[in-house]
Amino acid sequence: MIQVADLNDTVTIQISGRFDFRLIKDFQQLLSKSPRTWVVDFTGVDYVDSSALGMLLLLRERVHGDAQRVLLRGLHGQPRDVLVMAKFDRMFKVE
Amino acid sequence: MAYTQRIPSLTAHGRRAPGAAVLRVLRRIELECQTRAQAEDVADEIAALLPDPIKSRLGLVELLLNAIEHGNLEIGRELKSRLLREHRLDDEILARYEAEDYRARRVRIVVSVAYPLVEIEIRDEGSGFDWRAALARNDDSNDAPNGRGIAIVSRTCFPGLEYRDPGNVAIVRVAWPR
């Protein structure tokens, strides 16, 4: 499930449960927004798949690859393992 | 719903019992799927039999979705990138489930057990792909929104991932610790 907060030029995307291919459509709808900063909150995420990595990269394309403008928050467990394996901790700002 | 809740044997009996007990008497299971939702059901069933159901579930879903999308539905890597960027992937997949060329195609899964070894074979009806290149690929410079599934599977889920030529059969072998 995705919840979105749009405040002070920052869009915070809060995902709970699985962040996987089933969220592609909902996630893509968010990409029409154009804030200065994006925050993806992983606190409630217990599972990611390769589609989640793809969605994060689409977000990164939206800010022209500027790692400082996409913040990944609350990474832990399986999602953290998968993102680190894919070296996403170097491509995004991780809090 | 957390994925462990979809694995009844896990939640009902705790970790150790399901795999070990059933596997001693199990020899072979055959499953079949067409859609991504069915692929998740297949992955949940098989993962419940394996030592690390969390990693296994992810690995199986990745391989099954590859078999469906790239194999049976013939959505190539570049086309998938484009569909993702144009927000059309889900619609294209739904359309191809019904399309004459693809609608009869299934992914067939065979689980063979010789405890403590479990072998899982995933076969699609596509024309295969250059799996050697895919296994060797370094994704660090991949900027596309797709194409990381095999790396995830072989690096974090199933280190012994193999394919049979022409690449439409993926094989995974898992051993239970004694």
Image: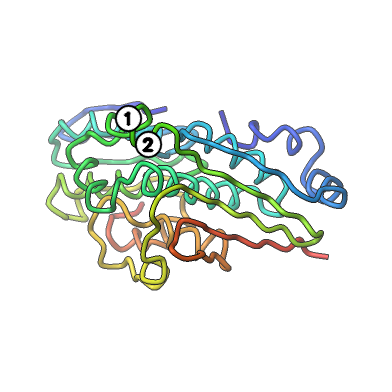
Q: On the rendered image, what quadrant is the N terminus of chain A found in?
A: top left
Who is closer to the viewer here, A67 or B53? B53
Q: Chain of mark 1?
A: B
Dot 2 falls on a residue whose secondary structure is loop
Dot 1 falls on a residue whose secondary structure is loop
Q: Which residue is mark 2?
A: B102
Q: Chain of mark 2?
A: B
A6 left or right of B41 in image: left
Who is closer to the viewer here, B55 or A67? B55
Q: Are marks 2 and 1 in contact (CB under 8 Å)?
A: yes
User: Tag 1: Cα neighbours inside 10 Å, few (<14), some, or many (≥20)?
Assistant: few
Q: Measured from the top left, where is residue B164 in percent x and y?
A: 51, 65
Q: Measured from the top left, where is residue B174 in percent x and y?
A: 68, 61
B173 left or right of A32 in image: right
At a point 38% along the width and 43% down the height, the residue shown is B69
At a point 63% along the width and 54% down the height, the residue shown is B120
At a point 15% along the width and 34% down the height, the residue shown is A9
- Determine whether B144 is above or below A35 in the image: below
Who is closer to the viewer here, B121 or B37? B121
Task: Specify the amino acid type for callout 2.
Answer: Tyr
Q: Measured from the top left, where is residue B151 in percent x and y?
A: 43, 62
Picture quadrant of residue B32:
top right
Q: What is the distance, in whole Å, between disc 2 and disc 1 at their CAs?
A: 6 Å
- Determine whether A60 is above or below A27 in the image: below
Point out which mark residue B99 bears.
1
Q: Measured from the top left, where is residue B5 in percent x and y?
A: 65, 31
B175 left or right of A78 in image: right
